[in-house]
Image: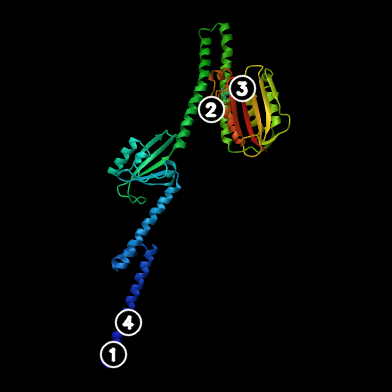
Amino acid sequence: MEYLLYIVIAAIFGTVIFLAMRSVNEGMKARSELKRDGTLDKNREDQYKFESVTPHEDEIETETSIENDERTDSRSTNIMDEVDDYLIVVDKYKNIQHLNRSAEKNFGKNLKGKHIATLMRVPELLQNIDSVLQVKKTLTMDLELNEPSFQFFKIYIIPGPSVFVKIPESAIIFLKDLSDIVKAQRFKSDFVANVSHELKTPLVSIKGFLETINDQAKDDIEAQKKFIPIMLDQAERMENLINDLLSLSRIELQEHIQPQDKVNLKEVLENVVDIHQRKLKEFNFKNNINEDIFIKGDHEKLIEVFSNIIDNSIKYSEKEKNIEVNLQRDLGKIIGKSYTVSVKDKGIGIPSDKIERVTERFFRADAKKSKKVGGTGLGLAIVKHIIKQHRGDLEIKSVPQNGTETKVHFPIF
Ligand SMILES: Nc1ncnc2c1ncn2[C@@H]1O[C@H](COP(=O)(O)OP(=O)(O)O)[C@@H](O)[C@H]1O
Ligand SMILES: [Mg+2]
């Protein structure tokens, strides 16, 4: 009887131990599953590692961490594919091991395995990569390339490996493309230099004449009579320049906003002809637009456009020559229907290699002539911006000594 009792107690004890062990095992399994999900917190993870475990579960842990690393890796690489900046990874031999999408787009595909010098043969860059590989400290440098086109980079050379790059003894070359910003900065400083120069010339001349009048020619009425009209002329040149600059900066600010008024081009051209009436009388001028044509635009700005174009025909043609304004339909370069206003003269013309530059600020095909007739070199730059704002197009055809045809295409209202 006693014997039987021992057996029952042992059986109960055994069952309890079995159940307890099973629950511990279940717990472990659950933890291991949690870990595989990646949701187990760090403390519990350590605890778990310390407590046990079977070789099988160890394997899983390793596999899981590799998987996670790879996931981080590919995700990081994908992130780098989303940016416009370039990322190139080189190994210790400076051979390219990875390029992000924009780098591939800019420098070309099939570069993996090739030496970085095949991509950028810049001694300073190669030296810097060497130092980063040796010293394992990030270096930065600026790089300006002018072939095939202008590019300016801020370069960070970062020693690998990193979260992103698992290659041992590597260098991550991160190229930040600052081309647009640098171009804009240089454009701005060139522009300021040009403006200063353009203003300084007439100012120096006015100052010189004033000094003469104030000094040697103090009592020389004849000399004063000669100098004053020149000074007035120079002052007018400065005034024209300032007016054109103000006009240009105003239009630049509004370039993205298309004017929405319904404008009659016939009326615009009639206004322009009125403004230049006195000078146009000296030419064989004909305005052949005698029907209403409506476009979406800004009346005053369109007056500025045709005023500048007709002013050029006047300035760059000899008196008595033909100047003609015509309308063409559907012949424009713009897809869809359009109106084209053409201003044609028989003037000095523009050399073919200079035509595409005449809309640049301060560019003059014939600088001497332009200055003599009071040009600022800004007229066609203003015209180009206003036409762009009107979603139109400008076309210039010219034959030296035979005349120029300036065409403005507008989309139909
Ligand atoms: N109708 C034209 N005939 C000859 N040359 C022209 C004509 N229109 C423009 N140009 C040339 O283009 C240059 C730029 O024109 P524009 O921007 O109006 O400046 P400008 O103030 O010198 O007239 C002029 O300096 C001139 O050399
Ligand atoms: Mg002009």
| Residue 362, horizontal then vertical, whole percent | 53, 25
The structure residue drawn at horizontal position 50% and vertical position 20%, both measured from the top left corner, is 200
Q: Amino acid at mark 1?
A: Leu
Residue 362 visible from this viewpoint: no
Sequence-first tag of 3 and 4: 4
Q: Residues within 10 Å of mark 4 (few under 14, many from 20)?
A: few
Labelled disc at residue 15: 4
Instruction: Judge depth for marks 1 and 3 and give the one in front.
Output: 3
Sequence-first tag of 4 and 2: 4
Quadrant hosting residue 227: top right
| Residue 337, horizontal then vertical, whole percent | 66, 38
Labelled disc at residue 357: 2
Task: Look at mark 3 in the image and give the residue it sits on.
Answer: 403
Residue 271 visible from this viewpoint: yes
Ligand 1 closer than 8 Å to label 3 CB? yes
Task: Look at mark 1 in the image and give the residue it sits on.
Answer: 5
Query: In the rendered image, which quarter contains the N terminus?
Result: bottom left
| Residue 308, horizontal then vertical, whole percent | 62, 26
Quadrant hosting residue 248: top right
Dot 2 and dot 3 residues touching (CB under 8 Å): no
Instruction: Judge depth for marks 2 and 3 and give the one in front.
Output: 3
> For the residue labelled by badge 4, is the local secondary structure a helix, a strand or a loop?
helix
